[in-house]
Amino acid sequence: MPINLNHEAQVEWDKYLEASSMEEQIAHLERFVGVVVKHKGVENHLRMAKQKLKRLKATQEKMRQAKKGSGERWLVPKGEDAQIAIIGTVNAGKSSILNSLSHSDSAAKVGAYPFTTVKPEVGSTTARGARLQLVELPAIVEGSVRGEMSGKLVLAGIRNSDCVILTIDLTHNPVEQLKLILKELSVGKIRLNTEKPSVIIEKVGSGNIQVFNSHYYEGKGNDEITEIMRTKGYMNVIVRFHGPTTVDQFFDALDYTISYLPAIIFATKGDVKGSKSNYSTLMEYISTNKLPLEIIPVSSSNNEGFDSIEETIFNKLNKIRVFTRNNVGDISERPIILDKGSTIENAIEVLSKKMLRFFRFARVWGKSAKFDGEKVGLDRILEDGDVIQVFA
Ligand SMILES: Nc1nc2c(ncn2[C@@H]2O[C@H](COP(=O)(O)OP(=O)(O)OP(=O)(O)O)[C@@H](O)[C@H]2O)c(=O)[nH]1
Ligand SMILES: [Mg+2]
């Protein structure tokens, strides 16, 4: 936290920390630099603020360029804490879900005719301070993976996201829709709710093919692994298993182009007659085939099923929200978003790398604290919703 700042500078700094968009962050940092009273005690802080400002402006410029460049326009630049792709077959109700989640009538055009959405449509929502960018992608069709109906761009859009909402229309053949989507995604090398294989493959300069912990491998052990690596053209490589690995998972691990994404099914149009029996059919299919997919029934028309849905989406992301507390006890509205398992050190890295060098201790409130305001060091693992105050 900044120390020895004059009041106006402190106000701008706090506003910067709580800003909800990059534009606001830039505006408050610019004002901060303009109003800060310079003295020895703030030199480091000011330098760090200027560097942050420079970085933010560079990112903003990149996003502007990406929007301009025609080929890139399809990939929506990540402007928020996480990007959620809304996908599904044609007319499934994707735009309606985008509008419901964005609390808007017009984030995307809804149409009773097919292919109303032909390019990505963007909306946003928040989950207790975390900003979720919602991107509806045009419909997935038979052959998306070969490029049908801009399919390659749709798949690239999915890979660019942090989580997928799979829209299934409950008014007709839900299982067929799900099968079609999963087939296109699977061929398109996108795995949903699937753990990355527990094997690490590391190319090395010499030493041939070395295999560690091959007892975890479901196949025939060292010789088979060495043979596979040889036929794949590897000469010097370390293969290290960290947990049970099937033959399929081993081949997946060798393919660096596979994307692993969390996903949820939104089974929509639940207000329509007959949707309940289609919902049961879909649930049965998922449980019989042991698909790792959770279904949330919704109706965009009746705005049903959307209560605390932002929390459900956020929980899929494997991220945590950490709030900061300033020296007068105010808590930031906007959290820092970190990967699950992050520590105080990781949080400070996001706030300011320089602060790490001057770190003395931190105080924590929330699930990871043994008591309110517990004094902790850099290695304390944080939990979702924690509040921290850093003393530097
Ligand atoms: N009854 C009912 N109709 C819905 C619901 N959601 C969407 N619809 C209708 O379904 C049709 C398609 O909705 P959209 O939201 O445009 O679907 P989409 O998946 O974005 O469609 P495309 O972009 O064309 O692929 C429209 O006529 C909507 O009014 C719902 O929850 N209940
Ligand atoms: Mg649409």
Image (cartoon, rainbow, N blue to C red):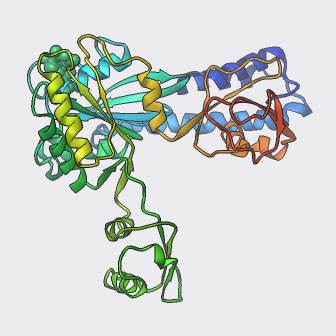
Residue at 91 percent across and 33 percent down: it is 40
Residue at position x 12%, y 40% in the image: 176
Toward the viewer: 375 or 332? 375
Question: Would residue 232 be found to the left or right of residue 4 on screen?
Answer: left
The residue positioned 90% from the left and 29% from the top of the image is: 39
Q: Between residues 115 and 269, which one lies in front from this camera angle?
A: 269
* Figure quadrant of residue 139: top left
Left or right, residue 179 beside residue 61: left
89 vs 34, nearest the viewer: 89
Residue found at the very far right of the displayed protein: 40
- State the image coordinates of residue 219 (x, y, percent, origin top left): 35, 77
Query: How many labels were placed on the picture?
Result: 0
Ligand 1 rendered quadrant: top left
> Horizontally, is 97 left or right of 162 in the view?
left
In the rendered structure, the answer to whether residue 260 lies left or right of residue 106 reads: right
Q: Position of residue 97 (x, y in %)?
A: 28, 22
Image location of residue 177, percent across then percent down? 15, 38
Q: Quadrant of the C terminus?
A: top right
- From where the camera sits, is residue 274 visible? yes
In front here: 12 or 360?
360
Please identify the quadrant where the N terminus is shown. Answer: top right
